[in-house]
Amino acid sequence: MRAGLRLLASALVFGFAPLAGATVHDQLFKGTFDVPPDAPTSTSDAARFLTQATFGPTAADIAYLMAQGRSEWIDEQLSKPATLGEPVVEAVSNARTAGGQNVGSNQRLNRWFWQAVYAPDQLRQRMAYALSQIFVVSDQSSSIGSTYMVPLTQYGDMLAQSAFLPYGQVLLNVTYHPMMGRYLNAFRNVKATFVGGVQTTSPDENYAREVMQLFSIGLIMRNPDFSPVLTNPLDPESTVPTYDQNVITQTAKAFTGFTWSDAPKGSGPPNYSGANFYTGGSNFAAQYAPMACWGTELFPATGTGSNNMRHDITVKTVLGDGGVGTNNTIPANQTCAQDLTDELAIIATHPNVAPFISRQLIQRFVTSNPSPAYIGRISAVFNKPGNDLGDVLKAILTDPEAENPPALCSGTNCDSYGKLREPVLRLTELWRAFNAKAPAPDQYGEVWMLGYGNFLGNFGQAPLESPTVFNFYLPDYQQPGVFADGNLFSPELQITNESTTYSTANVYYQFTQNAYQGMTNPRTDRPLIDLSSLTVNATNPTAMVATINAALFYGSMSTTMQTTLKNMLSYLNGASAQEKAWSAIYVAMLSPEFAVQR
Amino acid sequence: MNNSRNSRREFLRNMGCLACGGTAAALLPQLHMMGTALADTAAGSGYQALVCVYLYGGNDAWNMLVPFDTARYNTYTTSRSGVYNATTNPGGLALPLPAASAKIIDGNDPSSTTNQYFLHPSMPEMTTLFNQGKLAFVVNAGSLVKPITMSDYTTSSANYPQQLFSHADQTNQWQQAYAQQGITLGWGGQCGDLLRPDNVNTQLSPCISIAGANRFQVGTSTIPYQMSSGGLTNLSAMCNPTPCSGVSTSSVRDNALNAMLAETYANDFAGGYSAIFQRGRDLNNLLSSGLAGTTLKTTFPTQNSLAAQLQMVAKMIKLSMAQNYATRQIYFVTMGSFDLHSGMMSGTNDHAALLTQLSQAVNAFWNSMGPTDVNAQNNVTLFTMSEFARTLQSNGSGSDHGWGTVQMALGGAVHGGKLYSNGGGPITGFPNQALNAPNNFARGQMIPGIGVEQYAATLAQWMGVSVSQCNTIFPNLTHFGANNLGFV
């Protein structure tokens, strides 16, 4: 009942927002007015937008956004090229190997955090991070591990480069990437085998299942606003499955025949002597180049040499647009590339894709519980011919529901807008807010960001380190209590518990108390934050709290919390200016108010 | 239920329990009374604990427990695409037939043509415990809404659960013991709701997870307490325990943090985070020093995450018994990586490696419960859950998602040395493993003969939950022939 009331309230708040005409207005008056018409109304408003759209607001970005306005800022970000990690990580990896040092996930993560904090293409990097939580690949799988640390870095680059492409193209790039191949077993997946006419093996079903369940359409038919399609409107259980097990087994056949791009294809017809499906991946470039598919485009379907033809060319009865029982057919005897083109187009054009992907992107950037109308508006943008994920992200960030949070109610648990900030993002927000200075590169050319590391253990998350393909948390996770009772979703609370609140806090301590510029014996394995904006006011608790409120809370800190922090700083009057400063940041970072992005 | 933190804290203060963080029923006397009235106290004396070992990814249980007699072994071998051999049959998934000394006999089956099995060679410890009568297997259990056969399955989709073969959904259905979408309660948590009133300490949840959030332990008023296998850590630059006795920069920060956690919040996310953090502080105060002083004589395997989790469980059981915190507890630990679509039979993380870790970790836990250590072997029942077994047929280097599976239960109270495969439905016994046998699908996915709720209700009843309470926790239980499988 409470959720229903809130939806009604949302409609009232957002229903009359001036949507139409904004674009025309922009164009008419652009260049005429100093302040763009969609400029944030205040530095707080700008900081809030940058909290949604980047790895954390900086003073410089706030000023730039104020001058540009949201739309132009987004357009500029959409056109910025991707900052890449792979070339750097490959060079570090080679240098460390030459120096007798081991290489592992630390090298990848050092670069990832450097990009998060310092890359100019903030929106693209943030989108790549969001996509990495949908198209999940992880070094926690033994099929990737630290062995493929460099190509895994390139998987992240591929997501950044793909971030604003049409969805279907992203799906294609993901599907052909050897790290996804290795993670979900399309790599070296082969057609059915027969012994004496009896089928003894079938193609691996893993990618066929997860590409549909997690990367595109989900398990049940959805309306454009993500509400389930019901066969009986009065029965919420009367949902329609998107596919059945037979579709999985059939679809698995499409994802066969993949191997490293440099697997030797032999001397050519008729014998293809030297062809070896099971070798290759001989260097980093080969480990991230799109997989080759050993279909009829490379080898004959029958006769001499056909033993190398690993792709299943039988007819495939696959996903239909109308739910279980409706099907599409991929004809027999096609090339592997044609089968993949057909199959991925069938998935990408399924009506579920727009609401399924849009909702998760909204959850990553804005709010865990978008209204159906919000999802519906984004789905419409998603489905507009010619649009790409850049258009989708722009629509998400400029939607009235993103820009205008409902006024905070008075009372307890009366507001479910927003989301829990991810632990990783709370850290990058600290660094960006307080101008963290990265250490100089070490002798292997590596810039260290991680300190003692183990973010996965301490935070419950770290980029491209999900424990399973289901990401660190599910989009449908409902924390017991208020969320479950109200049928509300709270993904990030799935990794928030009595243990991780402590371990996360202790990481933040390491990056505040133990990592500021001017400290004696400064660490060289992590960025050092700049406390000067606080220490300059060391005897003025009110000014210090105002600085923190602007830097980390986009001005949203409650007066109660401001009083608590001011009192704390007053009681710390015997401490050094630096201790007052890091104490204020550290305690603020542990606060329930900072835990929320609203 | 929607109580403000203010009134909650006020209530705690009134009770003279300043540090209490516990769960909702600890805070609401009427809930406590309701629980007392409902709980079956017949088995309520003495300490008892359930330890759930969840195997994420779908354990290929048909390679954990394998028929030994020639006829059934040959069927198994054929369906699994032959015995694995790295050079001559790399796609085969069948295990070689071991020496007769590895054979185990199902004590529930007098027929020598059907009672011979062997366990995966990586599990010698489990073979020993089975032969000692401490370990039992529940065979061909899975998510069902009622007992069915293949013809029921093909007749109507209403006859079987939604979203079969999906990890997340089948995990939920095992942890709910209720094949229903759209609910959030687990069967462990609901048992906790009923059993908790007998626990002396109302602050410590009866459900304790060493493996993070899970649905299994969520009840109507029970929320799992989540610990790390590393134990409890101090909060940097704060007071541990909180508050400090004297004044220091740490105490000033600590007071500020506590003031913020004591505040009420309009926003659900802020309130949710605050409540968790507050519970963490309260439970750290309660447990930290006692846990640090709790040691075990048993050596646990290293480089084994499950072993580390079970070691923490053993310590918590010892501490809980010593401090009389509780008479009923339900623990949750996990292992992952069972989703072996590839590399099932070779590589550093193959099925053998996983089952080695499982067997060694469980064996160490069993030893730690022994009379010279914690001395609670008769008080603790450990059991596995996993969302499904896998296709018997190979996909070339592994197996895909299946349905009916095998679970194991271990304890002094377990009637071990036996297989339990008869739930009173139309499908009974160890399944015929021929592909496309009457109740199998084409790739050797088994229609279960035992519903998850039958397995769960058996364990719940051992904990003291009554049959009528089970019928509430497990709404479909009455559809099945037996409400107790008798293995414990």
Image: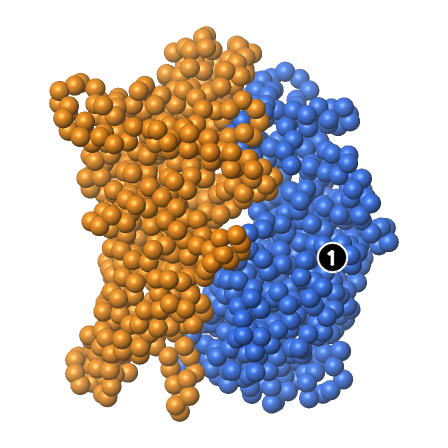
Chain colours: A orange, B blue
Q: Say which amino acid is labelled 1.
A: Cys
Q: Which chain does tag 1 point to?
A: B
**Between A62 and B255, the one nearer to me in the picture:** A62
Residue A55 screen position, x and y as percent: 35, 34
**Between A357 and A538, the one nearer to me in the picture:** A357
Q: Is residue A66 visible?
A: yes
Tell me what residue is drawn at x 72 percent, y 64 percent.
B478
Residue A299 screen position, x and y as percent: 21, 79
Residue A449 screen position, x and y as percent: 37, 37
Q: Is residue A127 left or right of residue B249?
A: left
Which residue is tagged 1?
B470
Q: Which quadrant is home to the N terminus of chain B?
A: top right
Q: Residue furthest bottom?
A: A196
Q: Does residue B339 lie above or below A38 as drawn?
A: below
* Label 1 packing within 10 angstroms: few (<14), some (14-19), many (20+): many
Q: Is residue A86 left or right of residue B361?
A: left
Q: Which of the 4 image quadrants contains residue A326?
A: bottom left
SS state under label 1: helix
Residue A415 screen position, x and y as percent: 51, 30
Q: Residue furthest top?
A: A539
**Between B250 and B423, the one nearer to me in the picture:** B423
Tell me what residue is drawn at x 18 percent, y 27 percent.
A26
Tell me what residue is drawn at x 41 percent, y 84 percent.
A199
Q: Is residue B462 visible?
A: no
Q: Is residue A342 left or right of residue B123?
A: left
Q: Which of the 4 image quadrants contains residue B420?
A: bottom right
Tell me what residue is drawn at x 64 percent, y 59 percent.
B177
